[in-house]
Image: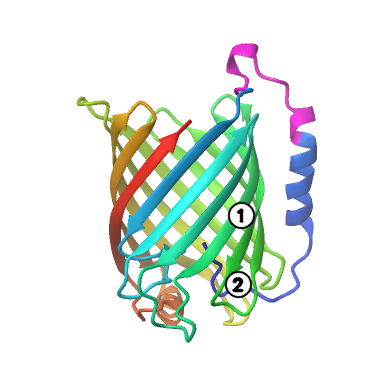
Amino acid sequence: MRSVSTSRRQVSCPFISAVFLMLVLLPHVVPSPARGDAPQDRPTVNASVDILSQYIFRGVALSSESAVIQPSITLGCKGFSLGIWGNFDTEEKIFSGNERWNETDFTLSYSREIVPNLTGTVGIVYYSLVNAPEDSTEAFAGLSYAFPWFTVGITGYREFHNYPGWWMQIDVSRNFKLPCYGMSLDVGVSAGYLDSNPQNYADFHSGQVSAALNIPVHKSVAISPKIGFAFPLTGDGRDNIKFNSWDGDAKHVFGGIRIAASF
């Protein structure tokens, strides 16, 4: 998922330093959990494919009048994970090359429960972008806390490769267990803050509400119809989203289905 309108100002290094310090020190400064709570030693594999009406990233539409197919696979072990994600546009018409497979992302991350219910995550994402002048790389760090009724998370992203800038996001989510066939409902809301020097932008940018109905069809496979609504949070955010969106709109309703398998 690509970056949008990120800042080119030279920002100081404390954030990046903190990311790598957390990567190095977190396993040593935090007491190991009890044996029963330790991450599984056995590697895990999670694979999924989303078929969506539109590709929306941080409020911006990165497809227009065409469905997208987004496969992903993630390998995990002892808190570490390595993921690959891609975007296939079924009918791209915006760019001269008309490349349908136009993005591949690679993510390496590490997560650990710091204290009960509080989880820290650090990582790096490399965005391979066909239709952008250069690829993009972000380091990120986040914290999430599981309250009895919902989970709150905050994550900061720092692009440091070709488009230096910041993206800060807060997420609130909840999973509702349903009384039939093992189904559950995921609902969430998020808000993002963008710091973009090229457009003299530093303000709240976009929000999103989403829902997905998880329907198990096998002990390892689930199908999830999903829907989302992305919208600007400010007037400047509206102008920024309209300028960057391939369809020229500021608000987007999108949906589709996910097929996911875990091993």
Measured as percent of width and height from the top left, residue 230 is found at 35, 63
Instruction: Name the residue furthest top.
Output: 35
Residue 183 falls left or right of residue 34: left
| Residue 71 x, y percent position in the rendering | 45, 53
> Which mark, by number, is residue 6?
2
- Chain part drawn in magenta: 26-40
Task: Decide if residue 227 is in sight here.
Answer: no
Q: Is residue 108 magenta?
A: no
| Residue at figure coordinates x 65%, y 75% from the top left | 134
Outermost left residue: 180
The residue lying at 29 percent from left, 57 percent from top is 255
Q: What is the C-alpha distance between the residues marked 2 and 1?
A: 19 Å
Label 2 or label 1, whichever lies nearer to me, is 1
The image quadrant that residue 143 belongs to is: top right
Examine the rendered structure and indicate whether residue 248 appears above or below residue 30: below
Tag 2: amino acid: Thr
Q: Which x, y percent locates residue 88? A: 43, 64
As helix, strand or loop, the secondary structure at mark 2 comes to: loop
Is residue 32 located in the magenta-colored stretch of the structure?
A: yes
Specify the label residue 217 is tagged with.
none
Work out whether mark 2 precedes mark 1 in sequence or the reverse, and give the earlier one.
Answer: 2
Tell me what residue is drawn at x 45 percent, y 37 percent.
151
Residue in front for this viewpoint, 217 or 36 = 217
- Disc 1 element: strand
Q: Is residue 190 visible?
A: yes
